[in-house]
Image (cartoon, grey):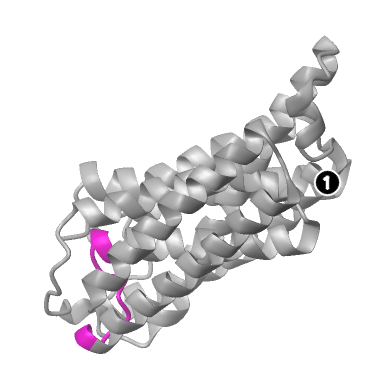
Amino acid sequence: MTQISFYLTLALYGVATLLYLACLLKTTPCLATAAQRVLVGGFLMHCLAVIHRFIAAGYLPITNMHESLSFFALTIVGVYLFFESRYKVGILGSFIVPFALLISIGAGIVPMEIKPLNPALRSAWIYSHTIMAFGAYAFFTISGGVATIYLIQSHFLKKKQLGPLFVKLPSLDILDDIGYRCLAFGFPMLTIAIITGAIWASRAWGSYWSWDPKETWSLITWFIYAALLHGRLTTGWRGRRAAILTICGFLFMLFTFIGVNLWIPGLHSYT
């Protein structure tokens, strides 16, 4: 049942991706509504798949690569739906939903079998640490997509190419506001994730910080977003430079989450 729900999720995300991409070519209220409804259906089916796996495994299903990629995609879609509903920016889905689909496909490619939980992971800290981390990752993913659109829009303005795509994309002010809110939510969540992770590490391995590759790259990512938030709050830093740093932060975050686990062995490596 878990795999059936997951594959139905993939199908719905795939249809939603096609509909959102079609909105780039021809935006109509009917098409935008259909895209959102299919995505909501995929999100609910994805929630069902995660619940099924939780029941089958007996623990929060975020302990291997399949589960982590799946949960990452789920949080991305959930956060995106919040912003689409809040700001009425369905066109943003043309950039975010395909990425969520790719992450979900990645989750479907890697082994999906349920394995016994590593003793070090049998802790209540798994909930606070990992949920905060995935929440932060989702907000940073949305901010990365928003920053990319910001650069596209600013390029159109600089070149005075106010064509059909420029009209469809949100204004720079709306994009900047969404980006700031993602940072305002994501940075505290990442901070809590790092703190609770250190406490958990002390309980599991006897040390708050061991400079494990995942810990090191998480700290680097934290400093990037701390610099970005500091610049925005103290000097009103915004515009192209802020967008570029946001994209850099997103790429570091993505490497911290996926690259480190795949290519740099450590205590946090997925099996």
Q: Quadrant of residue 241?
A: top right
Residue 150 visible to the viewer: yes
Q: Is residue 148 visible?
A: no
Residue located 31% across and 86% down the image: 123
Q: Is residue 154 magenta?
A: no
Q: Quadrant of the C terminus?
A: bottom left
Q: Residue at x 33, y 48 (%)?
A: 258
Frontmost residue, 7 versus 250? 7
- Asked if residue 207 lies left or right of residue 21, the reply is left
- Return the x and y of residue 132 as percentages of the image width and height: 51, 70
Q: Is residue 68 left or right of residue 2?
A: right
Q: As drawn, which residue projects farthest toward the top?
A: 159
Residue 59 inside the magenta-drawn segment: yes
Residue type, mark 1 in image: Ile
**What is the x, y in percent for residue 115?**
12, 74
Q: Which quadrant of the view contains residue 13?
A: bottom left
Measured as percent of width and height from the top left, residue 182 is found at: 68, 56
Does 225 sit above or below residue 206?
Answer: above
User: Residue 118 vs residue 86: left or right?
Assistant: left
Write down the region rendered in magenta.
Answer: 56-67
| View extreme (front): residue | 30
Q: Is residue 157 above or below residue 115?
A: above
Task: Identify residue for label 1.
Answer: 174
